[in-house]
Each structure stands twice: as structure tokens, then as C-alpha cells.
Amino acid sequence: MGVVTISASYGAGGVDVGPAVAERLGLPFHDRAIPFQVAGRLGVPVAEAEENDERVARGLWRLVASLGSVPDPVGGVVPLTGIPDERAFREQTERVLGEIAAGVGGVVLGRAAGLVLHDRSDALHVRLDGPPERRVAMVVARTGRPREDVRRELEANDRAREAYVRHFYRVDPRSCRHYHLVVDGTALPMESVVDLVVLAARARGIGAH
């Protein structure tokens, strides 16, 4: 079956491309299910691991530089007192990703999955990115939100997610060397991006047969 990991910067189309690729390949899409599993294993409220991406983006960047709290690698804002430490969250997230890859496979959005599963021969690692202004324009066109609000959110999100990867894995998530396929998600229609990812995945033997 295999696994496709998608690292997508804000506004580059990951939330649309991921599920579409999974459907085309006949694989499950793994996103919100991951924090449920991690929360259950650590015995913390699911809400701690299921915050929406916008709050993660705003909160994680502040917390990376904070001495009083740590980032939750599966999507939330977690104080240090009384909960598992950052290593426990990271290790459980990595364990869940490893089980997905070794089991049913699927398409995983975010969670630094490309770095966690970098050495698997049955994986395709994809990066979706694009110039900030075009990413802002795509979000504005899709949501109708004010451009300046979207711009601020994009900047916070980009900083937060880069800080997360650097904090846990000591690498630059924007570097092409971590991925098999890098696509400017703002330069092509979403359907064309999906076609490219599916074609690359099939070439690596990934997908339901």
C-alpha cells in the first residue's frame, strides 16, 4: 500500500490535495485521527491534541520561545505542568506514524511525517509551497477573508511550523532534499497538483492495487 506524506505551507493547498490524493490512490487520509490516538496513549484530553491549525500556528511560535510551556506536536498548546513532556508527545506521534506506514498506509498531512518516515522505501514525500503573496491570494479567494488578516496568519503559521521542525528535528523544512517531489501549489490548478502527486506515488508502487 505505502504512504504519502505531504508537508504544506499555509495556503499551498495541502488541506485539499491530501484528501484528494488519498481518494485517488484508494488509501485512508490521516490527519485528525492522529491526535486522537496520541491523546489516548498519553492519557490527556483529546482537546489538547485536536486544536485547529489556526490556533496551532498562533500558539506554537509563541511557545517555542517560552520557558513555561511546550508545543504539542499533534496540534495544540500544552503547558508543562501536569502533562507528559514534549518528548512523550513527539515519541507517541512518531510511533503512530510508524504504525500507519507499516500497516494500512495512507496519506499523511503534516506532523513532520516526511522526516519521521524518511528512510522508508514505500513512501513518497511531497512538499507543497509557493510565494507568500500567491498563497495569501489563494486563501482570500477561497475564504473571502480580509487580505491583511490572512497575511498575518500566514506569517505566524510559517514561523510556527518552521520552528516546530527545527525544534524537534533540527532541519529546515523548506529544504528540497527532504522530499521526492516539490510543487508550487499556487502555480497549478489543484487537480493538476493531485495528478502529479498520484503519478509520483504510483511510480513508487504506492496505492491500492
Image (spheres, helix red, strand yellow):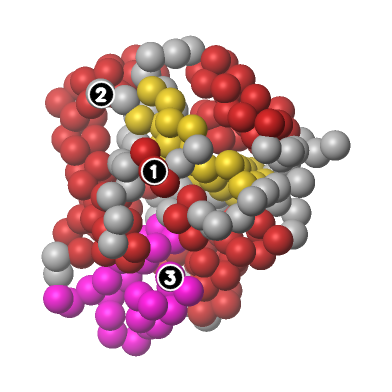
Comparing marks 1 and 3, which lies closer to the viewer? 1
The amino acid on which the numbered mark 3 sits, given as a three-letter code, is Arg
Of the residues tagged 1 and 2, which is closer to the observer?
1
Is 64 placed above or below 179 here? Answer: below
* Rendered view: 138 above or below 172: above
Q: Rate crowding at label 3 as few (under 14), some (14 to 19) or many (20 or more) other CA atoms within 10 Å.
A: some
Q: Say if 176 sits above or below 118 in the image.
A: above
Q: In which quarter of the view is residue 184 placed?
A: top left
Question: How far across and down, in percent of the image, does residue 19 sit?
Answer: 60, 34
Q: Is residue 63 visible?
A: yes
Report the magenta residues as a range: 67-91
Q: Is residue 83 magenta?
A: yes
- Asked if residue 58 lies left or right of residue 21, the reply is left
Count of marks overlaid on the render: 3
Q: Would you name the residue on which mark 1 appears?
A: 177
**Considering the image in quadrants, where does the C terminus appear?**
top right
* Circle 2 residue: 131
Q: What amino acid does circle 2 point to? A: Pro
**Badge 1, how many Cα within 10 Å: few under 14, some, many 20+?**
few
Q: Position of residue 48 (x, y in %)?
A: 41, 66
- Nearest to N terminus: mark 1 or mark 2: 2
Q: Residues under labels 1 and 2: Cα distance?
A: 19 Å
Residue 90 is inside the magenta segment: yes
Q: Which residue is mark 3?
A: 90
The kind of residue tagged 1 is: Arg
Where 116 falls versus 146 (above or below)? below
Q: CA distance from mark 1 to mark 3?
A: 22 Å
Q: Which numbered disc, 1 or 3, marks the residue that appears first in the sequence?
A: 3
Which residue: 76% across, 46% down?
1
